[in-house]
Image (cartoon, rainbow, N blue to C red):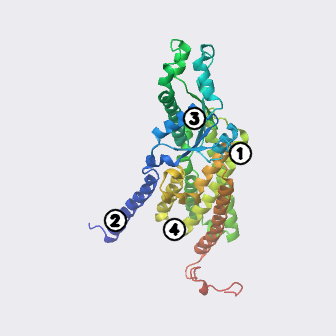
Amino acid sequence: MQIPRQFLGGVGGSFVLIQLLFLANMGYLYGTAFNDSQRIKALKLLFVDYDHGIIGQSVRAAYSELENSNFPTLTESLSIDFPSASDIRKSVCKGHYWGAIYVNQDASSRLSTALASPETAGTYENSYALSYVFNSARYPAYAQTISSSLQILVQGARTGYNAINGTAAMSKLNTTDQNIAQILLDPISATYIDIKPTAQGVRFYYNTVSMAMVILPQFFFIMALNGISAQTKIFQSFSLRKNISLRLGLSVCFTFIASLCMSGYIWAFREDWGTTSSQYGLTWMIIWLVMHLNFFIIDSVTAVIPVQFMPFFILTWIIMNVSSTLSPFELSPGFYRIGYALPAYELYQVLLDIWTHGCNPTLYRSLPILFAWWLVSAVTFFATMRRRVLLVSAKPGEPSISDPEKVEPEGRGY
């Protein structure tokens, strides 16, 4: 039996198109992290020296050795620009810097006094020398890179101090005293402030697979809804107004429950993460908004794209949205900043703002973009619902809505 040529043509076309679909989408996804290790320097760290002594010199010496494309950029500012440590924390909180390190006031004199006096050497705290700040909740995988970089800088400052002053000090100090010898071995350490400690195991899912979950449930439900609507001939049975009301009501109810469930499993697996009930409510509300606009988008697309081509749209839409949240834009090629306009990216920015009590102040941008998406998708939803209902309710032989000039006006008695 000979295989029909039409069958071979259809299968061959699908074969090629699906390969190209996945090649293009995965190429786009992988491109977000292409050579990202060479862009670590785009992440900025703040350095403030309140001491103006040898410890600050040691930090600068350490950074001069560490400075390269694989290490964040250390930007020094005057203490007058940051009068107190709380101002530094606030700057990191607002996202102006990924982290900060500062030399505490009188740190060098404390160290010098401890080295010169066996009486005070026993009470010397090397952790007073430096302090650093970072935010674990902001892209957790990259927050670890920031934390590690700051720790490396502290260790480098210790080495830098020994190179600048350690050898000379050994010839002048009483190194037979155990406390003084210990200080010479470990003169500089640091305390740290983690603005929002985020150590739970699922933290890496928040900006990755979770972003796909605001799209997929709507797609599966709409496909089921379309199939059931076709079987029950609901579009023919109900008027346009009733169809829109029914579909709109289902969209609100389904996304209400889906967003509640998503917020629920985020909270159920948060371990000892410090969050409040008000943060849960805000999380649920913003996820609900994004799920609802995705419902409108997917429902509109199903009305105009043949079902066999829906995977092309859904996969591309998911990959583009997830790609926008995987890593900071500073680490991706400039083209990927198109993600600023995508719902998933703005959703993640709002979630960070909620979870960190305002330490990611992008609401001025994120909320207008999300509401703009909702408004445009809602208008598209109403327009495509009208098209859908009129198309399926048209009887054989009657003019279709694609040819409006042939449609007889109402009230003619035909």
> To which residue does mark 4 refer?
305
The front one of 312 and 43 is 43
> Which three-letter amino acid code belongs to the residue tagged 2?
Gly
Tell me the number on the disc at residue 12. 2
Question: Residue 71: image x %, image y %?
Answer: 48, 42
Q: Is residue 227 visible?
A: yes
| Label 2 vs label 1, nearer the camera | 1
Of the numbered discs 1 and 3, the one sitting upstream in the chain is 3
Q: Is residue 128 visible?
A: no
| Label 1 vs label 3, nearer the camera | 3
Which residue is depicted at the point 67% across and 64% down?
Answer: 375
Which residue is depicted at the point 65% across and 61% down?
Answer: 374
Q: CA distance from mark 3 to mark 4?
A: 63 Å
Q: CA distance from mark 2 to mark 1?
A: 50 Å
**For the residue carrying disc 2, how many other residues have a C-alpha within 10 Å: few (<14), some (14-19), or many (20+)?**
few
> To which residue does mark 1 refer?
281
Is residue 66 left or right of 87 when viewed as pictured? Answer: left
**Residue farthest to the left, as pictured:** 1
